[in-house]
Structures are given as C-alpha cells and as structure tokens.
Image: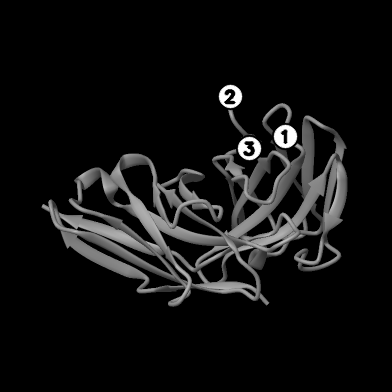
Amino acid sequence: DAGVIQSPRHEVTEMGQEVTLRCKPISGHDYLFWYRQTMMRGLELLIYFNNNVPIDDSGMPEDRFSAKMPNASFSTLKIQPSEPRDSAVYFCASSLAGVDTEAFFGQGTRLTVV
Amino acid sequence: AQSVTQLGSHVSVSEGALVLLRCNYSSSVPPYLFWYVQYPNQGLQLLLKYTSAATLVKGINGFEAEFKKSETSFHLTKPSAHMSDAAEYFCAVSLAGTYKYIFGTGTRLKVLA
C-alpha cells in the first residue's frame, strides 16, 4: 500500500476563500483522523471517523471547519471561509481497529492563508 | 484526563552520545503509549509503542523506551546518536476505550558532529 495520501501538499489561498483538503487512507483501515499542527498548539486532533461515521468532532475549532468521509477510501476537510489563523500543517492519519494500534500519517498539507 | 508531558523542547547531543528524550504521562488507567518521529516536511512515523506486554520496548533505528509505572514515565533512549536521528520526536497516549491519540508538544533533537 502507498500509505496515507494527502493532497495538495501545499495550498496558498486568500482570506475568505474556501479550502478543501483531501485524504486517502490506507486500504482496510477502519479509523481516519484529521490533525492540525502549529508551532503554538502542537498537534491537535480535529475529528476522527470510524467506518466513515464521525465519532468525535470536539476538536473542530469552529463552524467554519467541516469534514466528510463519503466512503472508506476518501475524506475531506473543508474550511469556509478561511482565515490567516488557519495557517498550519494538516495531517490525515488512519489506523486499524484496536486501541493499541498505531496511526499511520500522511505527509500533510501545508496551508497558508494570506 | 489523560495527557503527556515532554520535558525539553530542544535537546542537543554529540554524534555517538546517548540520546534521552523524556516523556511523562498522566492516566487514570493503564495507557497505551507511543513514540513517533517527524523528519522535516514529513508526516509522523511510529518508532515504538507500549501496549502492556513488555515494559522495555524496542523500536526502529535502535531506539527503545521503558515504561515505568511508578514514575509515570516512558522515556526514549538510544545508546549512540547518529546524524540521521536529527528530527522532532513526539510522545503520545491513546485514551482508554477510544481512538484519540493525545500528543506531547514534541522534542527537537539536534545531533552535533
């Protein structure tokens, strides 16, 4: 398997625009996670899915953020409208079932909102 | 609530010296603990994990960590640092009964020639 695939790797957008980040998890993984990494706050869990169903979205910062997982092989994280403080690296990760299993991370999307 | 604390945001060691990166956890139940490494412009990669089997856990690239319940610690060590070990290291705990991984703030390791 090619691992967790995220696109785009880099995104620069203007404040107020809609941004969509994409993720393809490892085939067969039951769980998908979206994380945000910033210098100030480190790695924060935004939301995670189990079998395409959102389980916990308590980390989503505002209503401007939304995430979907229409099928087992695809997820999106959307920010509308984007703001400069959303600038960060966004990681998608996936894992098998089992609380002791590790999460496999994608290479991340570096988002810059100007 | 469960959490992890990493002491030292930056650690410098000489090539060939011992690497010691500290992680303490807070958990009301036996935790699952992980160490991840992040190289520049890359995602996180698992180094090793503790899942209540052996207290001394060996990982990739010569790293190991020891789970000490009495000290609530899970420090990462490597006997001899290599230049390629320069990266950021994250300790993480998964909350019992959930799949939420809580990460520490990270320790950036610098290896001096």
Residue at figure coordinates x 60%, y 22% from the top left: A1
Residue assigned mark 2: A2
Q: Circle 2 marks a residue in which chain? A: A
Residue at figure coordinates x 82%, y 59% from the top left: A56
Spatial separation of the CA atoms under disc 2 and disc 3: 16 Å
Q: Position of residue A83 (x, y in %)?
A: 71, 64
Inspect this view and state whether residue B6 appears: yes
Q: In the depicted view, which residue is nearer to us: B79 or A71?
A: B79
Which secondary structure, mark 3? Answer: loop
Residue at figure coordinates x 46%, y 59% from the top left: B90
Q: Earlier in the sequence, mark 2 or mark 3?
A: 2
Inspect this view and state whether residue A18 appears: no
Q: In the depicted view, which residue is nearer to us: B33 or B12?
A: B33
Q: Circle 1 marks a residue in which chain? A: A
Q: Earlier in the sequence, mark 3 or mark 1?
A: 3
- Crowdedness near tag 1: few (<14), some (14–19) or many (≥20) residues, C-alpha within 10 Å: some
Disc 3 marks which amino acid? Answer: Pro
Q: In the depicted view, which residue is nearer to us: A41 or B24?
A: B24
Residue farthest top in this picture: A1
Quick check: B91 above or below B48?
below
Spatial separation of the CA atoms under disc 2 and disc 1: 13 Å
The reply to the same-chain question for discs 3 and 1 is yes
Residue assigned mark 3: A8
* Left or right of A63, for residue B92: left
Quick check: A32 above or below B13?
above
Which secondary structure, mark 1? Answer: loop
- Crowdedness near tag 2: few (<14), some (14–19) or many (≥20) residues, C-alpha within 10 Å: few
Marks 2 and 1: which is nearer the front?
Answer: 1
Which secondary structure, mark 2? Answer: loop
* Left or right of A17, for residue B29: left
Which dot marks residue A29?
Answer: 1
Residue farthest front in this picture: B53
